[in-house]
Amino acid sequence: MDKIIIKGGRRLEGRIPISGAKNSALTLLPCALLTDEPLTLRNLPRLADVDGFGHLLNQLGVSTMIEGARPEDFGRVMTLRAGRLTSTVAPYDMVRKMRASILVLGPLLARAGEATVSLPGGCAIGNRPIDLHLKALEALGAEIELTAGYVRAVAPKGGLRGGHINFPVVSVGATENALMTAVLAKGTTVIDNAAREPEIVDLCRCLVAMGASIEGIGSEKLTIHGKDRLHGATYRVMPDRIEAGSYACAAAITGGSVDLVGANAEDMTAILDMLVQTGAHVEVKGDVIHVSASGRLKPVNISTAPYPAFPTDMQAQFMAMLALADGVSVLTETIFENRYMHVPELARMGADIQVTGRSAVVRGVDKLVGAPVMATDLRASMSLILAGLVAEGETQVSRVYHLDRGYERLEEKLQAVGADIERVGSD
Ligand code: EPZ
């Protein structure tokens, strides 16, 4: 397994291109199942999860063609075509590697009238149930059966019908499955307490480009008027707000000066506001976000919550930054029950962090010291990279396959702005 070696202490300066959003790509790809015409997605990030999703779609009979991308390009264009499905089963060995596979459940059901998907199970950050996904599909008439580790959904004889879905908890994935099913249900569906993340807006815009009728896009109340069929489209994936936020933290933690090119600041208000509260300087010029910092950062208190509040996917990265702040910060993780796996690893580098229940008290220290550390999940890995960029000496991050799921060519992007970072194959 590869490792990433970082020698800390360099100020980052220069431009970092921001790739297409992983969490948008993973819900746009299954949209191809909703039509027998070609769906072309532009600005798809080159990520392990995107490749994995493509293989799952191939397994279902979807052809995927990647248009020539030069090796030096970031992102690529993929044309998908679900002319005729050859399977409606998403098998365990594929779903266990990528839990976002659950996002084929709704589209398969909507297109083929049935779907059998392995239960995704939990992951490092929590047990990640899918009860809200299933309740949403039942509200549209689906019969749901759980047997032998699989969920099987079947549409009624007359087909799925529009219904009222009222989510008790905001769920990004359940909102996505509900949307991708309702667009082909007969009649109107209303979704209350829908997730409002920018990735949901991206999904709605792609579905509308395919001929869907959706009102209330960007709000917590979505109204979908079902269609008999959708057509193909060409759609560009939004920029990744979490990748951009992660590199903004890299600029701030190293006291650097970095331009994030191709980012959309409007998707990142809570992240950028919090950065400014730590004393970093943020300036937005079109699709370039300039982030710089000098001197010690200030402590802040953060509580994660659904969009437009501070995103859970940025908690670990800010914790790394606040480990060196001039004072005490309190972080509260309200979305996932076990999203502090990065804490013991940061502590190995000298951070002073106490976790009690959902809250972590971070007492700023004067310095971090490089050490061998282990990545446990995607965003925890990034917090270790950030700590390594500023730590004294060398940091070795192992199990970097976690990183490759969500950050396109990370070490190249950081090398280009002066970081002493390299990837080595393990012996
Ligand atoms: C999406 O996960 C993202 N993943 C996550 O990003 C992100 O952290 C999360 O949304 C929250 O923003 C993708 O988009 C591929 P949820 P998702 O359903 O959809 C509970 C990353 O690092 N819940 O909004 O799985 C759940 O346990 C990843 O890029 C139920 O109880 O998240 C959690 O506590 C990590 N029942 C809360 O809701 C359900 O049926 C929010 O989860 C579904 C969810």
Image (cartoon, helix red, strand yellow):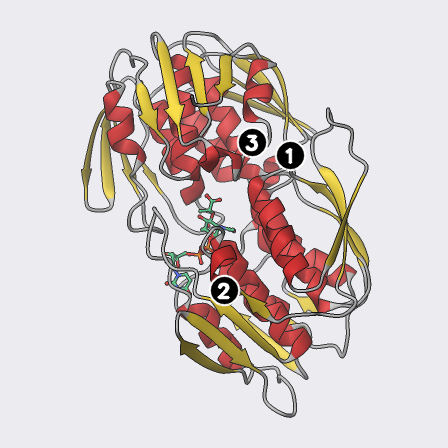
Q: Earlier in the sequence, mark 1 or mark 2?
A: 1
- Residue that badge 3 annotates: 244
> How dense is the environment of label 1, judged by Cα within 10 Å: few (below 14), some, or many (20 and up)?
many
Q: Do the residues labelled 1 and 3 touch (CB within 8 Å)?
A: no
Mark 2 vs ligand 1: CB below 8 Å: yes
Please state if 373 lies on the left or on the right of 312 as rendered. Answer: left
Q: Which numbered mark, 1 or 3, is in the foreground of this view?
A: 1
| Residue 49 appears in the figure | yes
Q: Which residue is drawn at 59% across and 55% down?
A: 200
Q: Earlier in the sequence, mark 1 or mark 3?
A: 1
Pick the residue in front: 134 or 52: 52
Alpha carbons under labels 1 and 2: distance apart: 25 Å
**The residue tagged with tag 2: helix, strand or loop?**
helix
| Residue 166 appears in the figure | no
> Which amino acid lies under the numbered mark 1 shown in the image of this protein?
Ser
Residue 67's x, y, as percent? Answer: 81, 41
- Residue that badge 2 annotates: 174
Q: Which residue is drawn at 55% across and 9% down?
A: 418
Q: Which of marks 2 and 3 is nearer the N terminus?
A: 2
In the image, residue 62 sits, relative to residue 53, either above or below, namely below
In the image, residue 36 sits, relative to residue 73, either above or below, namely below
Please state if 196 lies on the left or on the right of 390 as rendered. Answer: right
> How dense is the environment of label 2, judged by Cα within 10 Å: few (below 14), some, or many (20 and up)?
many
In the image, residue 249 sits, relative to residue 365, either above or below, namely below
Please state if 268 lies on the left or on the right of 333 as rendered. Answer: right
**The residue tagged with tag 1: helix, strand or loop?**
loop
- Residue that badge 1 annotates: 19
Residue 79's x, y, as percent? Answer: 78, 51
Pick the residue in front: 260 or 290: 260
